Image: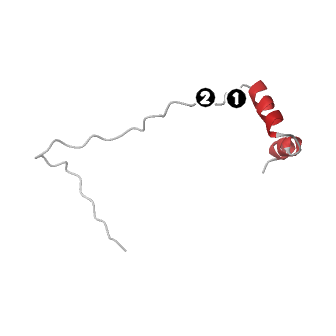
Amino acid sequence: MSEPLHRIADAVADITESDAVAALAALGLQKDRRQPAKKAPTTPLPPLGTTSGVSSDVEWV
């Protein structure tokens, strides 16, 4: 763990949960705030009945 993280961990080690919530709220953390899920790029499947020209050899071990 980096030195700044050690200092933060030491600073909050002895505070109550409500104090921690208040400190995080003061830093801008919202309790139920959620980031929108990022859509991962995907490769579309080829149309049915056509070949993609891609082959794969898989060995199950």
The crowd level at tag 1 (other Cα within 10 Å; few <14, some 14-19, many 20+) is few
Q: Position of residue 53 (x, y in %)?
A: 19, 50
Quadrant where the C terminus sits is bottom left
Instruction: Specify whether 31 is left or right of 16.
Output: left
Number of numbered markers: 2
Rendered view: 12 above or below 57: above
Q: Position of residue 60 (x, y in %)?
A: 34, 71
Residue visible at 19% across and 48% down?
A: 52
Distance from Cα at disc 2 to Cα at disc 1: 8 Å
Residue visible at 75% across and 27% down?
A: 25
The crowd level at tag 2 (other Cα within 10 Å; few <14, some 14-19, many 20+) is few
When asked about the image quadrant of residue 57, the answer is bottom left
- Which residue in the protein does label 1 denote? 29
Amino acid carrying mark 1 in the image: Leu
- Which residue in the protein does label 2 denote? 33
Residue visible at 27% across and 40% down?
A: 44
SS of the residue under disc 1: loop
Instruction: Specify whether 52 is left or right of 11.
Output: left
- Residues at marks 2 and 1 touching, judged by CB atoms closer than 8 Å: yes
Rendered view: 50 above or below 21: below
SS of the residue under disc 2: loop
Q: Position of residue 40 (x, y in %)?
A: 42, 38
Q: Position of residue 47 (x, y in %)?
A: 16, 41
